[in-house]
Amino acid sequence: MNRVRRMYRFFHLDRRTMLRLMEACFYLALARILILLPFSRVAPILGVIQEETSRELTGEKKVLSPVHDAILLMSRHTFWDSRCLVKAIAALKMLERRGLESTLYLGVGRDDQGKMAAHAWLRCGPYYITGYESMDNYVVVGKFAKVIDK
């Protein structure tokens, strides 16, 4: 699909979807910049280290699917690399903006060639927002609970 057709389709979306995709693009870019910084500076932004949020849903479930869809769609169309950690941080920020708590997990494991690999995924309540496709292949080595003060 060429760029003109993509632009045409984008501008013919409903306003809410268009704004959500623009927000996802912004947070994906921000997350990409954050992962270039030393992790010791980024960790406090992610939440409380080695803590988890509740597995009970504190917000509305109908908010989670559009966030997941926007992150997944926009990550395919960014000109920078938007892999698991970038997607997880972007989704964390989008959920934080909506007043929802989430937990970001960092894991390590082995890839198909036996080399060490890392992965990140995000959970909100009982639902996994990003990175759930392969999270079972990794051992959790870090978690960050983003608690929202009410």
Image (cartoon, rainbow, N blue to C red):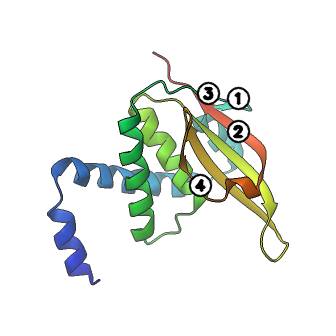
Rendered position, 109 above or below 89: below
Q: Quadrant of residue 11?
A: bottom left
Instruction: Mark 4 and mark 2 in contact? Answer it, CB < 8 Å.
Output: no
> Disc 4 marks which residue?
131
Instruction: Mark 2 and mark 1 in contact? Answer it, CB < 8 Å.
Output: yes
Residue 48 at x, y = what percent? Answer: 66, 29
Side of 19 relative to 45 (left or right) = left
Q: In front: mark 2 or mark 3? A: 3
Circle 3 crowding by C-alpha within 10 Å: few under 14, some 14–19, many from 20: many
> Disc 2 marks which residue?
143
Side of 150 relative to 22 (left or right) = right
Instruction: Mark 4 and mark 3 in contact? Answer it, CB < 8 Å.
Output: no
N-term-proximal mark, 2 vs 3:
3
Q: Which mark is residue 68?
A: none
> Disc 1 marks which residue?
51
Q: Quadrant of the C terminus?
A: top left
Instruction: Mark 1 and mark 3 in contact? Answer it, CB < 8 Å.
Output: yes
Question: In 3D space, how far apart are the residues under numbered discs 2 and 1 (Cα atoms)?
Answer: 6 Å
Q: Quadrant of residue 2?
A: bottom left
Question: In 3D space, how far apart are the residues under numbered discs 2 and 3 (Cα atoms)?
Answer: 10 Å
Secondary structure, mark 2, is strand
N-term-proximal mark, 4 vs 1:
1
Residue 63 at x, y = what percent? Answer: 37, 38
Q: Which mark is residue 53?
A: 3
Secondary structure, mark 3, is loop
Instruction: Mark 2 and mark 3 in contact? Answer it, CB < 8 Å.
Output: no
Circle 1 crowding by C-alpha within 10 Å: few under 14, some 14–19, many from 20: some
Q: Quadrant of residue 131?
A: bottom right
Q: Quadrant of the N terminus?
A: bottom left
Instruction: Please tell me how many numbered marks the rendered image carries.
Output: 4
